[in-house]
Amino acid sequence: MKQLTNSTKTAGPRCDLTPREIVEKLDAFIVGQDLAKRFVAVAIRNRWRRQQIDPAMRDEVAPKNILMSGPTGVGKTEIARRLARLTGAPFIKVEATKYTEVGYYGRDVESMVRELLDNSIALVRQQERVKIEDQAAAAVENTLLDMLVSPPPLVGSDEASEQSDVESQYQRTREKMRAMLLAGELDQRTIEITTQQKNSPVMIGGMGMEGLDMDLQGMLDKMMPKNSQQRQATVAEARVTLLEQKCDELLDDDKVHAMAIDLAENMGIVFLDEMDKVIGTQGMSADVSRQGVQRDLLPIVEGTTVQTKYGYVRTDHVLFIAAGAFHSTKPSDLMPELQGRFPIRVELDNLTSDDFRRILTEPKNSLAKQYVALLATEGVELVFTDDAIVALADYAFEVNQRTQNIGARRLHTILERVLEELSFEAAEINLGRVEINQAYVAERLQSVVDDENLSNYIL
């Protein structure tokens, strides 16, 4: 984690990637949508640029929030999710539809900031744990040796030489046991350890109660006695349990929380999905709540201070990426004030047959590679020929055009249909090499695709 002038400030890991490098890394997982990739890459690079400028101007530079529109399954969510992984930034994905206006039964929009902070705390704890893991491991090693080697008995003060011999022998035994412990020779030996049982979380109220600023669970943990439990465990199991306990002891929670708040404020990314669903339509009774959600989202996106049990979190520099299909509505139907908070707008393209072909083969985690790996565990060498890939892509594109367009998700349905028989029998029959060609694909799909009514239900 890159340190700034203040020890609790962090610029976030891997935030110095250039826009071109970010796009190249996104290309490894996402096909097409070049314009959207460029916009998000520039938005991330601008965060690095903001960290380099004069502190007096730094607070004035607001993030350029992004509004992505396009049909489902074209990569909106995947772009944001991969972006967060690349930069190591705190990231949450939330559906705008699960929030309701204050006063209605539902979730408070401020809860997204609390979720972002929880994600940030987990990231910081993981990074800080790496720094103290060697120290914790050494302490656990000594604790295990104390359990495995009994301390020498005390002798009278007039027998100092005998006591010295006993101590010397104890140290030699301890060092021998240390060597065996490090070599793993004692991993299966059973010892008795003491574990701290965490109190069950207290559930208060229901939906809409996330705004309670009192850490009631933390207060109860301090008031109630610790629940210790003795149990038998192998040395290997005890090492894992004791290491977790020791790391928790060594971590400074106040420092972790301060760093996490700063990381969330400066590097946090909130992906607001289903943004088009909070646009009211004429004659709908839920319009009041939908418009209210937009009004409640406005101060969060614009920049406000949200109270959490770990401290106050400012959203002025959190990057918001909103997305929606906008089938029956358009971005301009949003409240003008909210539109102004998303200055960058990008429309994602519909997927073509060629895009489907590339999705099946090019990404590192492509669907074809996933099925090859899955069936290899059953001893099946699955091979997709080039004409089979083209046929799968064509069928997916055709079904999307004739029925509901669900984008790349159609490929999951198509492939499951094609490989259903093979997946069912692979565990019981030694099939060896199986080649999937155009004829194999057509045999299992053509009749379903030709019957429009049938494809509505099956594909």
Image: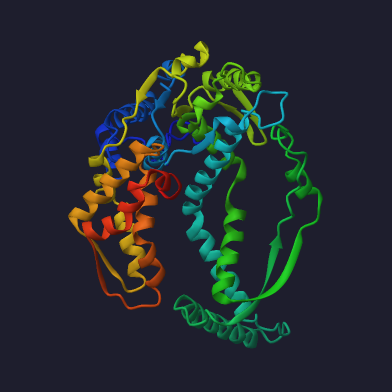
Which residue appears at 36% of the width and 78% of the height? 429
Q: Nearer the viewer, residue 400 or 286?
A: 400
> Can you tell which quarter of the image residue 408 is in?
top left
> Can you tell which quarter of the image residue 61 is in?
top left
Q: Could you tell whether 446 is left or right of 222 in the image?
A: left
Spot occupied by residue 303 in the image (x, y as percentages of width and height): 54, 20
Q: Nearer the viewer, residue 13 or 163?
A: 13
Spot occupied by residue 215 in the image (x, y as percentages of width and height): 73, 39
Give the total number of marks visible in the rendering.
0
Q: Could you tell whether 200 is left or right of 265 in the image?
A: right
Q: Is residue 86 above or below residue 59?
A: below
Q: Is residue 6 above or below residue 189?
A: above
Which residue appears at 76% of the width and 58% of the height? 226
Which residue appears at 50% of the width and 79% of the height? 175
Spot occupied by residue 229 in the image (x, y as percentages of width and height): 73, 68
Q: Is residue 298 above or below residue 350?
A: above
Spot occupied by residue 188 in the image (x, y as percentages of width and height): 54, 81
Residue 43 appearing in the image: yes
Q: Is residue 31 above or below residue 297?
A: below
Q: Residue furthest top?
A: 336
Quarter of the image with the N terminus in it: top left
Residue 365 appearing in the image: no
Q: Nearer the viewer, residue 31 or 2?
A: 31
Which residue appears at 72% of the width and 72% of the height? 230
Q: Nearer the viewer, residue 255 or 361?
A: 361
Say how the picture is coloured: rainbow
